[in-house]
Image (cartoon, grey):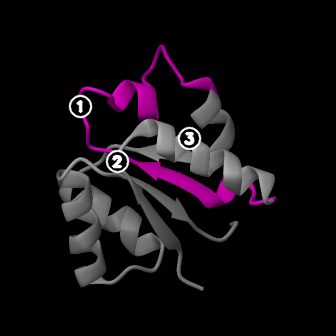
Amino acid sequence: MKAMVKAFQDDIGLLNELKKQASKGVPKECLHVFAHDDERIDCIVGDATFQPVDIADLAADRYNEEDSELRTVFSGFGFGSEECDGLEAKLANGKLLLVIGQPN
């Protein structure tokens, strides 16, 4: 089964959705966050010294890759080339993405 994607304008909406998924019993290992917003990226994906508590506790992975690295990650979730293009375009336009996949 292919992963599902939800797009958000801001980190509040993303965090609310992560909490909603957790309350529905979706395991952390199924939730993956993607962002390209350089101004907020540390808040969303964390860095070496700072890991956002709520998002780190609720999502398995947080990504900030671009181009071919990002395509590889999206392909791993079962998305085709055109879908990868669309997801990359959403990120380039400032959206935050939540990919809900299957547990490994």
Q: Which circle's residue, 1 or 3, is located before the other in the chain?
A: 3
Three-letter amino acid code at disc 3? Leu
Q: Mark 1 or mark 2, which is nearer to you?
A: 2
- The disc at residue 80 is none
- Along the viewing direction, whichever of 96 and 59 lies nearer the viewer: 96
Does residue 61 appear in this view? yes
Q: Which amino acid type is marked by label 2?
A: Gln
- Residue sitting at x 38%, y 74%: 75
| Residue named by callout 2 | 9
Residue 15 is marked as 3
Q: How many marks?
A: 3
- What percent of the width, then of the height, locates residue 69? 28, 57
- Quadrant location of the N terminus? bottom right
Relative horizontal placement of residue 76, taking residue 9 as reference (left or right): right
Q: Quadrant of the C terminus?
A: bottom right
Q: CA distance from mark 1 to mark 3?
A: 18 Å
Q: Dots 1 and 2: beta carbons under 8 Å?
A: no
Residue at coordinates 34% horizontally, 66% vertically from top-left? 72
Q: State which mark lies toward you, 1 or 3.
A: 3
Over which residues does the magenta segment extend?
25-53
Residue drawn at 33 percent across, 43 percent down? 64
- Residue annotated with mark 1: 38
Q: Is residue 60 visible?
A: no
Q: Position of residue 86 (x, y in %)?
A: 24, 72
Q: The disc labelled 1 sits on which kind of residue?
A: Asp
Label 3 Cα crowd, 10 Å radius (few <14 / some 14-19 / many 20+): some
- Image quarter of residue 15: top right
Name the residue at 34% across, 47% down.
Answer: 9
